[in-house]
Amino acid sequence: MEKELKQQPANCIKVVLFGPESTGKTTLSRHLARYYNSVWVPEYARAYLQDVWNNERRTCEAKDLLPIAIGQMALENGLAKKTDSVLICDTDLLETKVYSEAYYSGTCDPILDKYAVENTYDLYFLTYIDVPWEADDLRDKPNERERMFKAFEDALIKYNRPYVLLKGSKKERLDQAVKHIDKLIKDKH
């Protein structure tokens, strides 16, 4: 199982959209992948949990987190081989760890915890809670956005991750993200 959670070497810049639910991560990650004509790694948990909801009428449980993490890394590792420029990740294992600790009494499976900390990225974009909440089958904490935002930012600080806080409209966020990714590309070359 550990091999399935380990990040494989890749010849690309990896950026992660990171933050609470309903803060524009998926929209922005798709726009960035399109902008750079590159690869987008979707959030595996969305499809997995929608399937659980549709078939079992239940929300995420602790037992779902390792299959979600394995699915996320399988997507990332597979898609990282398809680009040598920028890989745009809608999420990562550190996000899964934050949710695990927030939802399940501060706990996280030790194997998930290990790879959430070990896997690395060139830059995180922390999405702020200044966009309207959009309800769906899976989102469930509209009144805890500030607390969840703080948990995400605290994780980035605790694990010394390079990050940029993104606020504002979709266009403002895209412009800010492009500026920072362009700098990473320039520095790489």
Image: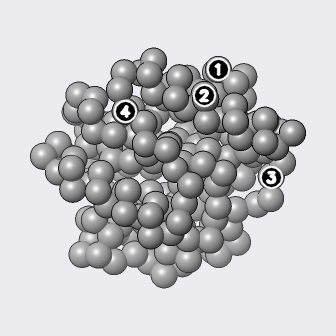
Label 1, secondary structure: give it. Answer: helix
Pick whichever of labels 4 and 2 is earlier in the sequence: 4
Pick whichever of labels 3 and 2 is earlier in the sequence: 3
| Residue ID for mark 3 | 10
Report, in whole angstroms, how far the alpha carbon at label 4 lies from the one at label 3.
Answer: 29 Å
| Residue ID for mark 1 | 35
- Residue lying at the far left of the rendered structure: 143
* Pair 3/2: label in front: 2
Coordinates of residue 153 in the picture (x, y in percent): 38, 56
Asked if disc 1 and disc 2 are in contact, CB closer than 8 Å, the reply is yes
Mark number for residue 19?
A: none
Pick whichever of labels 1 and 2 is earlier in the sequence: 1
Residue 91 in view, yes or no: no
Disc 2 residue type (three-letter): Val
Q: How many marks?
A: 4
Disc 4 residue type (three-letter): Lys
Coordinates of residue 168 in the picture (x, y in percent): 35, 26
Q: Residue at x 33, y 77 (%)?
A: 107
| Residue ID for mark 4 | 167
Mark number for residue 178?
A: 2
Relative side of 7 to 178, left or right: right
